[in-house]
Structure formats: structure tokens, C-alpha cells
Image (cartoon, rainbow, N blue to C red):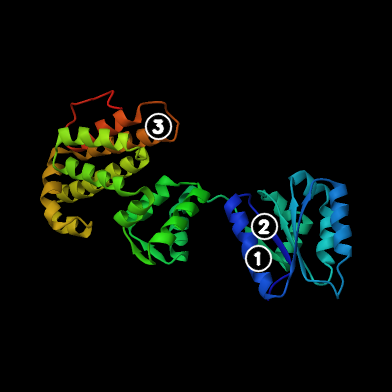
């Protein structure tokens, strides 16, 4: 049964918009045909809302009032009045209050407790880091996609915390890729056009330990204006594979079998197994630390030449720990 009292809270813009839209979609099926948005900034605007509600009677159109309580100061001052209204909603009327973040103590405010008990709460809070991967996976599934782990890792890392940009990219995928299984080439190829395949060429150059080709490809990726985060993601993915294979090797496990389980193609297994001979676990962990530093540069936490750092990281992944090149940007 559709309730006539709602509270959307949390302050995350896209989730708030989606929660309200979901409610609007539901009321259309319940023959609601009028929709009013009100912003409460003071007692005067509250009185204006009450005046509009007073026109609601049993013969009026069904109406949804979307009531934005713009600051915590407002809904604290009007707490008594909001509770009175929540207990006596006019006939043929639905109220949806909208607020930003609520503190734990604010859930003890009487009118919020009342909505929690007799209405419905719609949390729209920013997604915490430890739940972000699951949130991204859920968004994929809601659209009918089943991404592989590489796609999930890329989207989770590239759009971390930015729900609007994530949603925009998923909407693009939805217009060009049918529902079902989703791999890296499909997803990134749609979002970034053909030049994205240069990134996979870079991975091949690392596996072949072809330093000249690595340099050429990094310059090319820079010239094509490929996002540095995509290049970093591809390199970091290889480092993680190296670590898992190296651990297996150190434990005298069957590295060929492990490589298969990791999704490494048969024709590339020898390249991986040969390359990991050049590393110790400590060196590979150091590469992870370098990747984290580059990620900080990309996010603006540090000010450095990110393309120089990506080149050096790629060369070291190819087994060359001595070289350090600078000034490769065009």
C-alpha cells in the first residue's frame, strides 16, 4: 500500500532525484494528477504551504507535495508544526519531505520518528568506500548487465564516489550494448571509442618487455588524450596478476593452472610466467605503492607529471627497474 507520508534524506543529488522520481512514478498509478514543489526557508513559506494544503478536500485532485526543508535550523524550529501536519495530512494529499544529511541525534526529532513509524524513509546518502563496489555492481544489475571483475574494478575505481558520472556512463552503455555479460573491451570501447585499444596494446608491450614500444604507446595515448586513469587501471591490473602468480610460484603451486583461473589466455601464459621471474614480491608491492601515488596525482592530491610516472611504471612492470624517463609529454 502506498503511504501518504515520506522523508527523502541524505543529500546525494542523484539518489535524491531518483527517489523522488520513483515516488512520482508510483503515484501516477494511484491516480495522483497534481504535483507541487515547495521550499521552506522560513515561517512565511511554511504558512504558504499550509494555505495550499487548506485547499485540498475530498473533491480535489490528488496531489503530491514535495517539501524541501532547506536547512536543519528550519526543520528544528518548525519541528512541532511539521509533526502536527504529519498527523493530520489532508485527504487526497501525499507529503514528501526532503532534507540533506541527518545526524544520529536528528533521528530522535519527533516528526522524523513519526514518519519512520507511520510513513516511509528514503535514505539517499553518499555511498561509503567499503560499499562502493557493491553499489556499482547493483547499478549494473539493475540495467540488466553482468560485468566481469575487470569491468567492475574499472568503473568502481574510475568513478569512485561520483554517482552522477557513473550513471551517465551506464546510460551510454545501455544505448549501445545489449543486456547480458559485459567485458572490458565492450564497455571501454563504447565509452572511449577505438583509441582505447591502444591501452591493451600497452599491456602486450609490457608482457613482451618491449621498452621502445612502451615509450611509443605512452606518447600515443597522451596524444590521443586517453584518460590517465584508464592507463593506470590497465597497468595496475597486470601488477595484481603478477602478484598472484608470484605467490603461487613461491608456494610451488601449478602456475599454469593458476593463470587459467585468472583468465589469462593460453597464448599469453608463457609471457606472464617468464616475466614474473624478474620480480620479487617486495618489488611488486613497491609497484602497487607507485600506482597509488600516481592515482593521487590524477586526483589532484599531488602535483606531478602523471605521464612520466605512467611511463616509468610501465617500464618497471616490463622488468626494467633502472630506467627513469622524464619529459615525454607532447
- On residue 192, the disc is none
Quarter of the view holding residue 227: top left
Characterize the local packing of mark 2: few (<14), some (14-19) or many (20 or more) Cα atoms within 10 angstroms: many
Residue 224 x %, y %: 32, 38
Camera-nearest residue between 311 and 81? 311
Name the residue at 58% across, 53% down. Answer: 14
Name the residue at 36% across, 48% down. Answer: 192
State which quarter of the image contains the C terminus: top left
Characterize the local packing of mark 3: few (<14), some (14-19) or many (20 or more) Cα atoms within 10 angstroms: some
- On residue 297, the disc is 3
Answer with left or right where residue 175 lies relative to residue 241: right
Q: Is residue 329 among what the camera can see?
A: yes
- On residue 23, the disc is 1
- On residue 8, the disc is 2
Residue 122 x %, y %: 64, 60
Measured Cα–Cα span from mark 1 to mark 2: 10 Å
Measured Cα–Cα span from mark 1 to mark 3: 41 Å
Characterize the local packing of mark 1: few (<14), some (14-19) or many (20 or more) Cα atoms within 10 angstroms: some
Query: Which of marks 3 and 1 precedes in the sequence?
Result: 1
Quarter of the view holding residue 51: bottom right
Residue 105 x %, y %: 70, 50
State which quarter of the image contains the N terminus: bottom right
Measured Cα–Cα span from mark 3 to mark 2: 36 Å
Residue 26, placed above or below residue 209:
below
Amino acid at each position: 500500500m502506498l503511504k501518504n507520508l515520506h522523508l527523502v534524506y541524505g543529500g546525494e543529488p542523484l539518489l535524491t532525484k531518483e527517489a523522488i522520481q520513483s515516488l512520482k512514478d508510483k503515484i501516477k498509478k494511484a491516480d495522483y494528477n497534481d504535483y507541487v514543489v515547495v521550499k521552506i526557508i522560513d515561517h512565511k513559506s511554511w504558512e504558504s504551504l499550509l494555505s495550499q494544503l487548506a485547499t485540498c478536500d475530498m473533491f480535489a485532485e490528488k496531489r503530491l507535495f514535495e517539501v524541501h526543508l532547506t536547512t536543519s535550523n528550519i526543520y528544528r524550529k518548525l519541528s512541532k508544526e511539521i509533526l502536527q501536519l504529519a498527523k493530520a495530512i489532508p485527504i487526497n494529499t501525499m507529503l514528501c519531505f526532503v532534507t540533506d544529511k541527518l545526524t544520529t541525534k536528528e533521528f530522535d526529532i519527533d516528526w522524523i520518528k513519526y514518519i519512520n513509524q507511520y510513513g516511509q524513509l528514503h535514505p539517499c546518502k553518499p555511498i561509503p568506500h567499503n560499499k562502493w563496489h557493491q553499489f556499482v555492481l547493483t547499478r549494473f544489475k539493475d540495467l540488466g548487465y553482468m560485468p566481469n571483475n575487470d569491468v567492475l574494478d574499472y568503473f568502481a575505481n574510475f568513478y569512485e564516489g561520483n554517482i552522477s558520472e557513473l550513471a551517465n556512463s551506464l546510460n551510454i552503455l545501455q544505448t549501445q550494448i545489449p543486456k547480458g555479460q559485459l567485458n572490458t573491451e565492450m564497455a571501454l570501447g563504447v565509452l572511449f571509442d577505438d583509441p582505447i585499444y591502444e591501452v591493451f596494446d600497452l599491456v602486450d608491450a609490457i608482457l613482451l618487455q618491449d621498452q621502445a614500444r612502451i615509450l611509443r604507446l605512452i606518447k600515443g595515448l597522451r596524444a590521443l588524450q586517453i584518460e590517465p586513469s584508464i592507463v593506470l587501471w590497465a597497468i595496475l591490473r597486470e601488477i595484481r596478476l603478477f602478484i598472484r602468480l608470484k605467490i603461487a610460484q613461491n608456494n610451488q603451486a601449478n602456475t599454469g593452472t593458476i593463470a587459467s583461473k585468472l583468465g589469462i589466455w593460453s597464448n599469453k601464459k608463457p609471457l606472464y610466467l617468464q616475466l614474473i621471474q624478474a620480480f620479487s614480491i617486495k618489488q611488486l608491492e613497491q609497484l602497487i605503492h607507485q600506482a597509488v601515488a600516481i592515482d593521487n596525482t590524477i586526483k589532484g592530491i599531488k602535483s606531478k607529471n602523471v605521464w612520466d610516472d605512467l611511463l616509468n611504471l610501465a617500464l618497471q612492470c616490463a622488468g626494467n627497474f633502472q630506467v627513469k624517463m622524464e619529459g615525454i609529454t607532447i
